[in-house]
Amino acid sequence: MGMQLNSSSGRRGRRSFNAEINVTPFVDVMLVLLIIFMITATALQRGVEVNLPRAATSNLSVPKSTPLLVTVTQDAKVYISETEIARDELTAKLLAIAGEGYQERIFLQGDTDAAYGEVLAVMTEMQNAGFTNFALVTDPKARIERGQ
């Protein structure tokens, strides 16, 4: 009726602890977070809200790096990304940001109600500073309405 313990198998019935860490769940969570940050980072690069002119053209390819965005608002204020700058400081700021030999495309967007001369003056300043690779941003809804 009594239970016998065999001295040679005293630890056979006990479970031993596994000292290894299973990192698979951590890797899965990190990959999901990386994807979320990659998507939200590109969505946050919007710049200043303006009414863009409509043009039924094909879209340009978006560069792999974050594009430099210059905006002219209805009241002739100039922004680089979301930072307002004085018009006479535009060339100096662009050179400070981009440096010499900047080959990436700079996106210029002007409000629909902005004076044509203001947008053209900003474009001329950019060109005189040595930036020749820039594109005008238009409203992408025009392509959808046209059926393209």
Image (tube, helix red, strand yellow):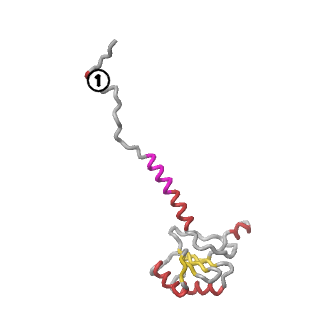
Q: Is residue 29 magenta?
A: yes
Q: Residues within 10 Å of mark 1 (few under 14, many from 20)?
A: few
Q: Position of residue 108 (x, y in %)?
A: 59, 78
Q: Position of residue 146 (x, y in %)?
A: 74, 68
Vertical side of 100 occupied by 35: above or below: above
Vertical side of 38 occupied by 138: above or below: below
Vertical side of 124 occupied by 22: above or below: above
Name which residue lies at 51% across and 70% down: 66
Is residue 127 rendered to the left or right of residue 111?
Answer: left
* Location of the C terminus (image quadrant): bottom right
Residue type marked 1: Ser
Q: Position of residue 38 (x, y in %)?
A: 51, 61
Q: Which residue is mark 1?
A: 9
Hey, which residue is sitting farthest top in the picture?
1
Vertical side of 83 occupied by 30: above or below: above
Name which residue lies at 45% across and 46% down: 25
Hey, which residue is sitting farthest right in the picture?
146
SS under mark 1: helix
* Location of the N terminus (image quadrant): top left
Q: Nearer the viewer, residue 75 or 35?
A: 75
Image quadrant where residue 144 sits:
bottom right
Q: Is residue 63 magenta?
A: no
Hey, which residue is sitting farthest front in the picture?
2
User: How many numbered callouts?
Assistant: 1
Q: Nearer the viewer, residue 101 or 27?
A: 27
First to last magenta residue range:
24-34
Name which residue lies at 57% across and 72% down: 47
Q: Main secondary structure of the magenta part?
A: helix
Q: Position of residue 94 (x, y in %)?
A: 50, 81
Q: Nearer the viewer, residue 29 or 105?
A: 29
